Amino acid sequence: MTVDEYTWPLSQLGEAIAELGQRAGLVSAAGFPGSPPQVCHTDPDALAIWLGQIAAGLGLETEAVETSYPDIEALLCHGPPALLRLPGTDPGESSGRGGFLALMGSRGDRLHVLGPDGKSHWVAVSALRQHLCDPWEAPLAVGIDALLVAANIPAERREKVRGALLTEQLADQHLTACWLLRTSPGTSLWQQIRQSHLLRSLTVAFSANIFYQVLLLFSWMMIGQGALQGHFEWTWLWAWALLLLSMIPVQLLIAWAQQRLTLEGTLLLRQRLLYGALRMDPELVRHGGVGYFLDRVLDVEALESLVLSGAFGTLLAGVQLVTAGVVLYLGVGGGLHVALLLLVLLYVLGASWFYYRRFQTWDSAHRALSTDLVEQMVGHRTRLAQEAPSRRHVDEDRLLMRYLKASERRDTSQLFLGNAVPQIWLLLGLALLSYNIVVEPASVTALAVSVGGVLLAWRALGQFMQGASNLVRAFVAWQEVAPIAQAADAPPTTAADPGLALRSAQQTATNERMPLLTGHQISFRYAADDAPVLANCDISISVGDRLLLEGPSGGGKSTLAGLLAGVRQPDNGLLLLNGYDQQTLGEENWRRQVVLAPQFHENFVFTGTLAFNLLMGRGWPPQAEDMQEADEVCRELGLGPLLDRMPGGLMQEVGESGWQLSHGERSRLFMARALLQQAKLLVLDESFAALDPDSLEQALQCVWRRAPTLVVIAHP
């Protein structure tokens, strides 16, 4: 069978995504979305948007990727689950070939492909690669073959040399029609854990550790019995040596499983927190400050290392303690030894709670100190100019004194959770064992078992104490980053009908009689007990309108701009875009059609190239036409001299550690960023405030000419 027989037509692409997600284990059950709208047959950007919305409705996400010619085979082997568009499926082509492949996975040199008949098929990676690269390779094949013959290349080497020449000549060709299918970071954490390999790595580590404890116990019984009897038999010595050798691969397996668990857990945690950070309430981000979020970043670093090492170490120590309890019960001490071990564990739990309370107080003082330091560093020049020298260190001294006292109390509590506990257990355990021997003599085997149990519990307690300390610190760090993780639990509103959302976006360009955006009785307040910033506000914006919104500071202009752009949700009232509310269109579709350029202090120049800052609202990496349009917009806004001065042009590094932009240049950069998103409605919040009259006139002409519908907010 040929590759074309496994392809899905464009009309069944929604069904392919749902079936692929279910077969790949990314979703438990999935309905079958409808067919893509007609616009997807002619517009590749609309197709990509529709794919993303269909996936979001299923709790998935699609990531459009591109790869160079030499790396196509690696993408086919490591990219699945993925959707791959075959040659001949691009809009406007009518070659009769093409379609979409649903790649489920790979094994060796074969790909697992899901066909439209619902069955799984195996396709050779080389055959699919040849199918994808044939449009590029065919025009060069005749010339390369003639060159190989003329150069007298041996027949057995021609295929290798031919591949090298093709790689060299086609290195600049890219395969762009591929979408990776992944679980959305906004799905439940437990579902992501099940779909990842965390449980498998944890099971392997847990089982291997139990097996290791069994080997350790038998090795101790063999050597201990001989030691207590005063003579060794070579048979038992060889058996003991074999057991020790058997422990080596088991320990390696435990270390490998722990490493896998750490890597997979760190990846899952970072994805979750990054997604939550992007979903946080804008008001919390605005009022948090630089120091606040720097502390959260440090907490994430601590959480990664502490929770994984602490949780894993405590789990293994728990297994060892259970094993030690069983061994002690079978030994001379019996239930008394087990009761003593339980008393020691109760003390450890109490000391851990005491340490947790003291560490929480210390962490609060440390956080206040570091936050204040960062904020003071940011405003250092203002302090030098405005604050009296005699008062510059008053607050720092107060925070330092609080931190010093909290550190003393934390260090004192840590003494109760230190290394003394295992030593105390060893002393008490051996003392009880000695008492039992004096009261009631026991056999050598029972004595060896008891000594082994005491030593095993001693070792487990040391590991358990270290793990408990790490877990305490990790729990305190988690309390601080929990708001970020909880923000990920509120996924964005997805379009009820992705096809309807796309048709709504097209409607703007064809029906100019209908209002673009309307609001009825809109009310908004920042807190439940605050006075409303907006009350019963009505607004209507039609296609082509040019509106100027003026008002005093604090009058609600920026609040209204945030409501129009979908950044905030009204408490009451109804906002409609092309006749549909945000719940129908979805957040992403709404914000794609209405773009807001916030005020200067709420906008940011990211560390990266100027092109990245300009085109971050479009596809990345950019196409040649994207770079050309960015250059045109910048020059129309008056940034031409800046581009000419920059050695790298649009690829010049900017930001805190790059090329420093002036206030006016940054303002025009923000305007260019908003214009390049090609939205139907553009809202500029005091974007012209930092411009001189000449720059203002030039920028206003550019915005007036390029924005289909415009709302400008300014002070009167």
Image (cartoon, grey):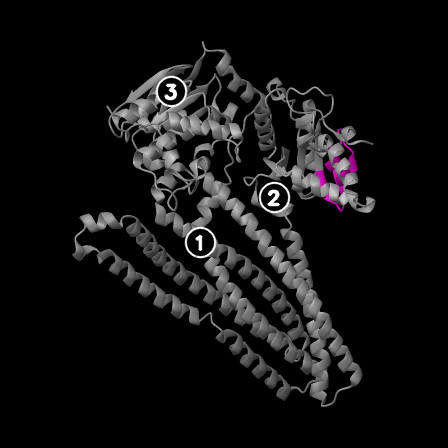
Q: Which residue is mark 1?
A: 299
- Residue type, numbered disc 2: Gln
Of tags 2 and 1, the one toward the viewer is: 1
Residue ID at (68%, 58%) = 204
Magenta segment, which residues? 104-131
Residue 8: image location, x then y, percent: 72, 27
Of tags 1 and 3, the one toward the viewer is: 3
Q: Which residue is mark 2?
A: 191
**Badge 3 local density, few (<14 within 10 Å), some, or many (20+)?**
many
| 3 and 2 marks in contact (CB < 8 Å) | no
Residue ID at (41%, 68%) = 413
Numbered mark located on residue 710 in the image: 3
Q: Is residue 45 above or below residue 310?
A: above
Of tags 3 and 2, the one toward the viewer is: 3
Count of labels in the image: 3
- Residue type, numbered disc 3: Leu
**Quadrant including the C terminus:** top left
Residue ID at (72%, 83%) = 225
Q: CA distance from mark 1 to mark 3?
A: 42 Å
The question of residue 376 being in magenta is answered with no
Q: Is residue 396 left or right of residue 657?
A: left
Which residue is farthest top?
513
